[in-house]
Image (spheres, grey):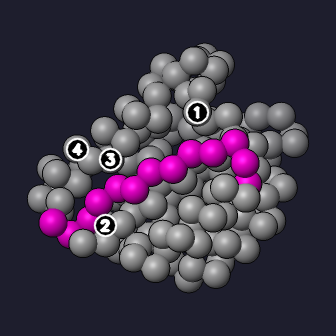
Amino acid sequence: MKNILLINGPNLNLLGKRDVEIYGNKTLSDVEDILVKFINEKDLKNKFQIKSYQSNHEGDLIDFIQANSKDSHAIIINPGGLTTVGFSLLDALIDTKLLCVEVHISNIHEREEFRRNSIFPNYCKYQIAGKGVEGYRLALEKIINGD
């Protein structure tokens, strides 16, 4: 069985409480449940499992990636507050050579200027933005379908 790493960066621990008008009322636990349900519905529970991690600290995210990428198939990442500045995190993703999908709950391209220039499309095969927490399921679907 291969892991699909679900990585969430700074401030996403407050999902469901923080700016619900922008981010909605679903929590990270809800996101994990959505992904596990999708895997079960596709009868892939013997092939893939979700391994989740969230931190407000870039180094901790890097440590998680380095410790878990060997036994993993792909990565879904919402870099949160590191979207425009997390170069060390980006390097950790590149070093894995895994399929990576970047997810943003809000549409970063239609928000404040400082949120618009993600550094992660330089490596991530896809970026899904503005689809709410449904973006995580769309990312998983792309991974499973091998898009």
Relative to 18, residue 44 above or below: below
Is any part of residue 146 visible from this angle?
yes
Q: Residue 103 location, x and y as percent?
A: 56, 50
Amino acid type for the residue under numbered disc 4: Lys
Query: Residues in magenta?
Result: 46-58
Q: Residue 116 location, x and y as percent?
A: 79, 47
For the point 53% across and 70% down, the residue is: 67
For the point 31% across and 66% down, the residue is: 144
Marks 2 and 4, how far apart in space? 14 Å
Amino acid type for the residue under numbered disc 1: Asn
Mark seen at residue 61 = none
Lower sequence index among marks 2 and 4: 4
The answer to whether residue 94 is left or right of residue 114 is: left
From the image, which quarter does the N terminus lie in? bottom left
53 in the magenta segment: yes
Lower sequence index among marks 3 and 2: 3
Amino acid type for the residue under numbered disc 3: Leu
Of badges 1 and 3, the one in the foreground is: 1
Q: Residue 3 location, x and y as percent?
A: 36, 66
Q: Residue 131 location, x and y as percent?
A: 50, 39
List the residue tagged with mark 4. 37
54 in the magenta segment: yes
